[in-house]
Amino acid sequence: MSISNRLRNKIKQAKKYEESGDREQAPEAYREVARLMKAFAKKAVSKDAENRRIEKAKSFLNLAKKIESGEHEVGDSGSEPKPAMDSLPDEYRQMVNSLKFSSDITLEEIGGLEEAKSDLLLTYGIQLAKKPQNVSVEGWKNVLLFGPPGTGKTLLAAAVSNHLNAAFFNVKASDLLSKYFGETPKLISALFDVARGEADQGFSVIFIDEFDALSQKRGSRSETNAERRVVSTILAELDGLSEKGEDEAVLNIGATNAPWDLDNAILSRFQKRIFIPLPDYRARKDIFRLNLEGNGIPVEADHDRLAENTEGFSGRDISRLCTEAVSTMVKEKNNDIPEVIGEGINAISGYELDVEPLTYRDFERALEEVDVALEDAKELNERYRNFSNSGQ
Ligand SMILES: Nc1ncnc2c1ncn2[C@@H]1O[C@H](COP(=O)(O)OP(=O)(O)OP(=O)(O)O)[C@@H](O)[C@H]1O
Ligand SMILES: [Mg+2]
């Protein structure tokens, strides 16, 4: 297990002991956390990050001592130290925490996108690897994913973040502009602050979706001062120029369906831009497999044939198609349910659903129900491809 994983687990364990009021195990666990944190500091990619981790190690050691001496109460009233969040008012803490997102998705559960996956891992691997003395590699922190809707951009960001055992913050740019009206620049700084704090125990990924929403406002007449402040705060954070300094362990992923709407000021922040295309034949086959396996319903329809007949579909379209095929079959096989329910709730709890293998015909019928704007989709896909080839 990597040291960041061990650290994470140990911190969890120590907090549990602390919360349960265990005055013997808690300090011991915190001492171990401090020891691991010191070892983790040696692996830091910059002097700054190393110092921050050493400080953290000290504060964990202190906490262990205070619990032992009784100066720090344990049990429900005891609270763990959160240096990065100490100075944050409660409402920001809550807002930032509501942006933290946890999902178990793995890279294997994403169909296709092999190139994008390895591109991302390589990019971040280089960013996170220890550099030889006197070697500095700059500017790999910000990655832009662009492509048609429903092709796996959000999935990919979440899966990469899981893969790195990172804390994952999921933010929509449009929400930043509208939802937290007036408070947004403070919230953004808080977000990056918290992410930096968490990164000392591993890595943090900040995912900002709908990035184009920021750009369209820039320079347009309707742009208000408040919006300008939001955009410039985000850009400063992406540059790592905030007063709190840079942290190599905070990685930023932006996503957009409209890369051509991004102005240069924004585009230039993303050192790496990755095209997430519509799935090709092989990827579609993969996505069918991922959607259809694991629910216990046998499939007699040939995956090759399904993939052949869904050119231009996004992953989301395929997922909708599969859901539609399954639910139509289930509804048809069990159309007596309303009647049974009519007999009372006991009758339905004794009712077992009838299912049968899915055939190609089930998918054909689902195809008629699921609306996919194929002409637009292919044309748009080309436009993205041209954008990625134009060296933008
Ligand atoms: N490559 C893929 N492999 C497996 N499932 C996929 C894939 N792409 C899309 N899906 C399915 O489509 C859904 C939407 O994917 P996701 O949210 O990642 O798309 P997106 O590219 O972020 O879309 P948008 O641009 O609209 O935000 C997923 O929950 C999943 O069910
Ligand atoms: Mg998305």
Image: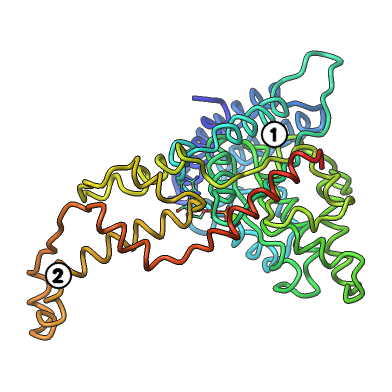
**Where in the figure is residue 64, as x and y percent of width and height?**
58, 38
Q: How many residues crowd around disc 1 within 10 Å: few (fewer than 14), some, or many (20 or more)?
A: some
Q: Is residue 295 above or below residue 52?
A: below
Marks 2/1: CA–CA distance: 63 Å
Q: Secondary structure at mark 1?
A: helix
Mark 1 C-beta closer than 8 Å to ligand 2: no
Give left or right: position of 80 versus 206: left
Query: What residue is drawn where x is 85% and y is 69%?
Result: 227
Mark earlier in primary sequence (2, 1): 1
Residue 334 - label:
2
Residue 182 picture quarter:
bottom right
Q: How many residues crowd around disc 2 within 10 Å: few (fewer than 14), some, or many (20 or more)?
A: some
**Where in the figure is residue 139, as x and y percent of width and height?**
82, 34
Residue 120 picture quarter:
top right
Q: Is residue 321 visible?
A: yes
Give left or right: position of 106 versus 72: left
Mark 2 C-beta closer than 8 Å to ligand 1: no
Q: Are marks 2 and 1 in contact (CB under 8 Å)?
A: no
Q: Is residue 351 above or below residue 311?
A: below
The residue closer to the viewer here, 120 or 26, is 120
Name the quarter where the C terminus is drawn: top right
Name, please, the residue furthest toward the top: 133
Query: What residue is drawn where x is 75% and y is 26%?
Result: 45
> Marks 2 and 1: which is nearer the front?
2
Q: Is residue 24 visible?
A: no
The residue closer to the viewer here, 260 or 281, is 281
Query: What residue is drawn where x is 45% and y is 45%?
Result: 104
Residue occupied by mark 1: 58
Q: Is residue 215 above or below residue 196?
A: below
Q: Amino acid at mark 1?
A: Lys
The residue closer to the viewer here, 80 or 392, is 392
Q: Amino acid at mark 2?
A: Asn
